Amino acid sequence: MLTVDALTKTYKTGDKALKAVAFTVPKGQVVGLIGPSGAGKSTLIRCINRLVEPTSGRVLLNDLDITALPGSGLRRARRRIGMIFQEYALVERLTVMENVLSGRLGYVGFWSSFLRRFPAEDIESAFRLLDRVGLMEHADKRADALSGGQRQRVGIARALAQDPELLLIDEPTASLDPKTSRQIMRLIVEICDERGLPAIINIHDVLLAQQFTQRIIGLRAGEVVFDGPPAALDEDVLTRIYGEEDWTAMRRSAEEDVAAERDAAERMAGMV
Ligand SMILES: Nc1ncnc2c1ncn2[C@@H]1O[C@H](COP(=O)(O)OP(=O)(O)OP(=O)(O)O)[C@@H](O)[C@H]1O
């Protein structure tokens, strides 16, 4: 379980990016974090793994107080937190398998990691993960030979290779087409359910968040202004999160996207 307790971040510039943010995420739950630009979503994700130092408040991962850890303890704690990124952050010239195994680098000693020699059980487990994300036959391909959706699957497998207790996911579908985005969201939610992993997904696509996550947290100007099930996310709530003008513009562009996708599907159907 992840507990975020009265988390506050004030940057040196005086920007109050988080104001006493508090929530808990139980095992297996996937939370969609939404909010307008500048609401504090990235700051929240970065404060949880302490890439950004919180000003006050606490972050607990199961029984471990991440906010109280000194440097060495923090490195060990970060192994427990898997990260998945918008731009995948793969090593392009390495193979799919090597990228997945790089998730184990925090566990093997310096020379083994320098020589990229991994224990047999790490390799077996990496094969199982590649199978789970549907990339078994691509294990030996270089990462730069893959499609965007396949790359994100490698990113997911690499995060899981860490054997994490929490996943922090930053805009996982922002570089993908709508169909691939849905496949990736479905995969993330299924895997979190199978492994009892809590996850927070920073996601700008409200419809996608609503369709796949079990809970939505809406941030506005550093404060949680909504925390509840996707079904409760009505026009009033969305206006509260995004403001009247931005929500109307977002809804219009989402409707246009849905219509464009439907037209494309109809055209494809007409061709066969
Ligand atoms: N390194 C920094 N120094 C000073 N202020 C910062 C820094 N990073 C973010 N901020 C400020 O903190 C607030 C929250 O920013 P943050 O990037 O967390 O928002 P966000 O919701 O992730 O936005 P976006 O969706 O555009 O990525 C903003 O006012 C931003 O200007």
Image (cartoon, rainbow, N blue to C red):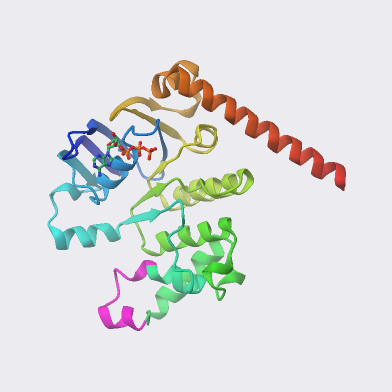
**Residue 240 against residue 155 in the figure, above or below:** above
**Coordinates of residue 19 in the picture (x, y in percent):** 22, 30
State the residue at coordinates (15%, 63%): 72
* Side of 50 relative to 159 (left or right): left
The quadrant in which residue 99 appears is bottom left
The quadrant in which residue 22 appears is top left
Q: Is residue 65 visible?
A: no
* Side of 137 relative to 231 (left or right): right
State the residue at coordinates (18%, 47%): 53
**Residue 91 against residue 181 in the figure, above or below:** below
State the residue at coordinates (50%, 25%): 231
Q: Is residue 205 visible?
A: yes
**Coordinates of residue 45 in the picture (x, y in percent):** 31, 44
The image shows a total of numbered marks equal to 0
**Coordinates of residue 190 in the picture (x, y in percent):** 51, 48
**Residue 59 against residue 162 in the figure, above or below:** above
Q: Nearer the viewer, residue 1 or 154?
A: 154
**Where's the N terminus, which quadrant?**
top left
* Side of 192 relative to 267 (left or right): left
**Coordinates of residue 133 in the picture (x, y in percent):** 54, 60
Q: Nearer the viewer, residue 157 or 266?
A: 266
**Residue 109 against residue 146 in the figure, above or below:** below
Residue 41 part of the magenta segment = no
Residue 104 part of the magenta segment = yes
Ligand 1 sits in quadrant: top left
Q: Which residues are magenta?
A: 103-115
* Side of 78 relative to 196 (left or right): left
State the residue at coordinates (29%, 71%): 107
Q: Nearer the viewer, residue 17 or 47?
A: 17
